[in-house]
Amino acid sequence: MTGRQKKYISLLLKILVFALATWYIVVKVSDRSNIEKFKTLIAGLEQHSVVWTLILIVVLMLVNWLLEVVKWRYLASKLEHMSFWKAFQSVFCGLTWAIFTPNRIGEYGGRVLFLQPQHRAKGAVAMGVGLFAQLVLTSVAGSLSIAWFICKFLSTPLTVQFGVWLLAIIYAGGFVILYFNVKWIDLLVGKIKFLTRIKPFFEVLEHYSMRELSIVLLNSLARFVIFTSQYIILMKLTLPELPLLSMILMIFILFFVQAALPTLDIFDFSVRSFVASNLYSYITTQEIAVMAIVSCIWFVNLILPAIFGSIFVFKINFFGDTNS
């Protein structure tokens, strides 16, 4: 293609992504059910407390995504130097792409298109390391919390309880071992004949040391603590009678189920609300309040960043250096 053709195609793609993101955001912001859930959440609460709590939730969201910017820049440094501002734009642009793609797969495209063309495939693999670190924490906390839930709320004999805990520990341990030996994935790809053509893209996994993987995992742990804190803050404000330990462990189960179920962000809030309301029905009758909390956090953590990220869609150069 000529330079002019590439320019026009790039512009059309940007407009398409921006239009899809705008449509989705407008639909969700104007959805009366979401508005009613928010009204339910703040009903009967002091306005002063609500305002400061929501400000805190938004601040935590910003800290959360800034940590992700730091992590993405750190992972991508194996491929090319990336300024903090460029990493910032790519992360928020990725969030805009993610909201209308299955299982948020568009987040990969939104980010790696800020890399040089020759680094984009390896960049997707590097980004996968960061997502895997987050998944390790979700899987460890979630599997152990599910074992606790089964033993506490379901009538199961001791032998079954022992088996459940054993499976949970093996499952959690497997994720930790695989994470710190992520280079095994590169070896596995090399042994599968029809994947040999893409093996060069996975070679970046060989370059992450145990120390570097630990740093990425600690960053992910900080983000995990922030996710959890957002739920705790809203739940203690609206449902102060909930026992703290049960509340936290059920949050971990919610994260686990949310990560395990393939979904589209356009339906994600419905899945989260359904799972949360059924899960928390074991410790509270305020299911509507629980659904409202989940919807509020979903909006703050995904929709607000996607709105902000939409302005960076036009910074992408699909066919070359974004700085050119």
Image (cartoon, helix red, strand yellow):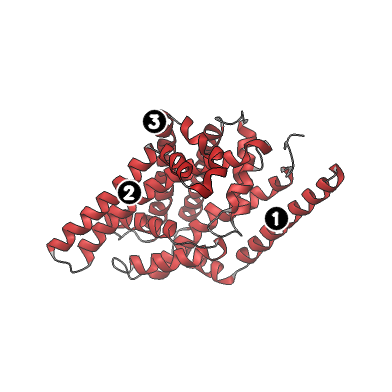
Asked where in the image residue 16 lies, by quadrant, the reply is bottom right
Residue topped by disc 2: 140
Task: Measure the C-alpha gap from mark 3 to mark 2.
Answer: 19 Å
**In this rendering, would 309 be left or right of 267?**
right
Residue closest to the eye, 317 or 267: 317
Secondary structure at badge 2 equals helix
Q: Residue at x 61, y 30 (%)?
A: 80
Please name whichever residue, 70 or 180, is drawn nearer the observer in this view of the structure: 180
Q: Which residue is mark 3?
A: 210
Q: Identify the image quadrant of the C terminus.
A: top right
Question: Is residue 27 among the parts visible in the rendering?
Answer: yes
Which residue lies under the disc numbered 1?
17
In this view, the residue in front, 251 or 185, is 185
| Residue 243 seen by the camera | no
Q: Label 1's element?
A: helix
Q: What amino acid is found at the position of numbered circle 2 in the picture?
A: Val
Mark 3 crowdedness (10 Å alpha carbons): few <14, some 14-19, many ≥20: few
Q: Earlier in the sequence, mark 2 or mark 1?
A: 1
Disc ID at residue 86 = none
